[in-house]
Amino acid sequence: MNKDAENIIVRRAENTDLPKLAEFLQILVEAERPFDPTLKDGEIFYYDIKELVADPATEIMVVESNNEIIASGYAQIRPAKPYEKHELFGYLGFMFVTPEFRGKGISGLLLNTLQKWILSQGITEVRLQVYDENESAVKAYEKAGFKKLFTTMRYEIS
């Protein structure tokens, strides 16, 4: 992490953070629209952030710089498919870093913190979803050690 990110704090999200997290979610949706023609117009809420904050199987983390929230992400414990080797896995989502803090190690810090929480739950399998065409995100996750596992394909028939 470089000098611009000196006063960095990673902490658990609280209800007082909900307005900023709702703002981040809409920025994330807008960034993902070019990758997904099936998204509805207008505001979209992939999930209820307030519910996630209260959920004991979910850990939402925020990153602050000088008391301002600059990043978010969550880890959630989910049941695996009956045919998979593991019973539970950690799922990562809502990974967002404000543009001015990208490339400064914030996403890596957030990923490490969330992975530590998953490990503390006795789980070693971690998964996430990312749009294949979102090359910068794919590269960042690959740099963090993730490998592609599955590709979802779509086709609109007429």
Image (cartoon, helix red, strand yellow):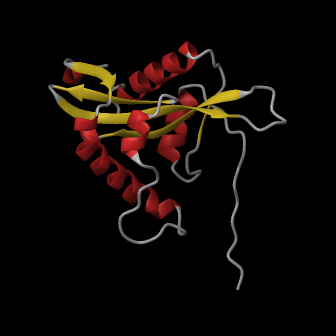
Query: Residue pushed farthest bottom?
Result: 158
Res 54 → quadrant: top left
Q: Which residue: 27% across, 36% down?
A: 15
Q: Residue at x 53, y 69 (%)?
A: 37
18 to 91, vertically: above or below: below
Query: Residue lying furthest left in this view?
Result: 66
Residue at the location (43% across, 25% down)?
108
Q: Quadrant of the N terminus?
A: top left
Which of the 4 quarters of the picture holds residue 10?
Answer: top left
Nearer to the camera, 11 or 29: 11
Q: What is the count of numbered marks?
A: 0
Q: x%, y% of residue 45? A: 41, 56
Identity of the residue drawn at 70% across and 50% down = 151
To which quarter of the image does residue 78 belong?
Answer: top right
The answer to whether residue 116 of the structure is visible from this angle is: yes
Q: Is residue 147 left or right of residue 70?
A: right
Relative side of 146 to 52, left or right = right
Residue 155 location (% of width, % of height): 70, 71
Toward the right, the furthest residue is 83
Does 7 sit above or below residue 22? above
- Which of the image's four quarters has the C terminus? bottom right
Q: Is residue 96 left or right of residue 39?
A: left
Q: Is residue 26 left or right of residue 116?
A: left
Comparing 59 with 145, the one in front is 59
x, y percent for residue 46: 46, 53
Residue 101 visible: no
| Residue 121 image point, x, y percent | 57, 17
